Image (tube, rainbow, N blue to C red):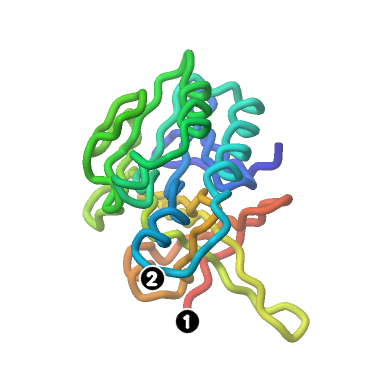
Amino acid sequence: MNFCDITLNGAHLKTLGSGALWWPDQDLLCVSDLHFGKSERMARRGGPSLPPYETRDTLTRLAADLDHTQARTVICLGDSFDDLQAAQSLPEEERLWITRLQAGRRWVWIEGNHDPGPIDLGGSHLAQLAMPPLTFRHVATPEEAAEISGHYHPKVTLPTRGRSISRPAFLLDAHRLILPAYGTYTGGLRSHDGVLAGLMGPDATAILTGATPVRIPMPRL
């Protein structure tokens, strides 16, 4: 399992190459922006047709991370479903898969802007969760310290050999950690976007996901 060690407000964490966050001292795995059911939601709203396999692919990667970490607590940081109807429309096989992953674990669904209400699956549904010394929520708040959030799907674009490559990335400064989107069908917001540049402090770093996580100063314009 590939990871990068980080510390936030005294908590020792590991950012995994998959885009998940592992907190060993709490036996806790955190993922953000799964967007289950995105292909169904897009088809329902007249958007482009996408192969309806993103939920299975995301669950496969999540199951692998749970096997590696043996986490006893899972926090899904909001936008776990592309909308509430997408949650209700999940095929039975995928609902049962989620139930199997939940078995024997504390499972927390944090409220997101895509899924603001309770869902008909196991686990608890919360607006945010305080686990001192950290707070888990969907959207970062500029005035808050020691928070872990998602929402923005951050990614980093780097020039290499005459072309650019983009990879989802964690963004970390002294006060917050923003997770990349974990879901298969998710885009991203570049780290130099004004919203992220305004949220993250001048000391911010980016941790690129992939087979070998790489930590660099957060790219800015």
Q: Amino acid at mark 1?
A: Leu
Q: Are marks 1 and 2 in contact (CB under 8 Å)?
A: yes
What residue sits 47% from the left and 81% below the top? 221
What residue sits 56% from the left and 47% below the top? 19
What residue sits 45% from the left and 31% below the top? 95
Q: Amino acid at mark 2?
A: Ala
Asked if 29 appears above or below 173 in the picture, the reply is: above
Residue that numbered label 1 is attached to: 221
Residue that numbered label 2 is attached to: 197
Tell whether 133 sits left or right of 218. Answer: left
Q: Can residue 29 be seen in the rendering of this structure?
A: yes
Give how far across and how far down residue 184 sits, in percent.
Answer: 55, 53
Asked if 169 appears above or below 162 in the picture, the reply is: above
Ranked by sequence position, the earlier of labels 1 and 2 is 2
Tell whether 62 sits left or right of 37. Answer: right
Q: Secondary structure at mark 1?
A: loop
Q: Kindly give the residue lying farthest to the top in the view shown.
A: 104
Give how far across and how far down residue 55 sits, in percent.
Answer: 52, 44
Residue 88 placement: quadrant: top left
| Residue 165: numbered disc | none
Tell whether 189 sits left or right of 141. Answer: right
Give how far across and how far down residue 115 sits, in percent.
Answer: 29, 46
The 10 Å Cα crowd at callout 1, few under 14, some 14 to 19, many 20 or more, is few
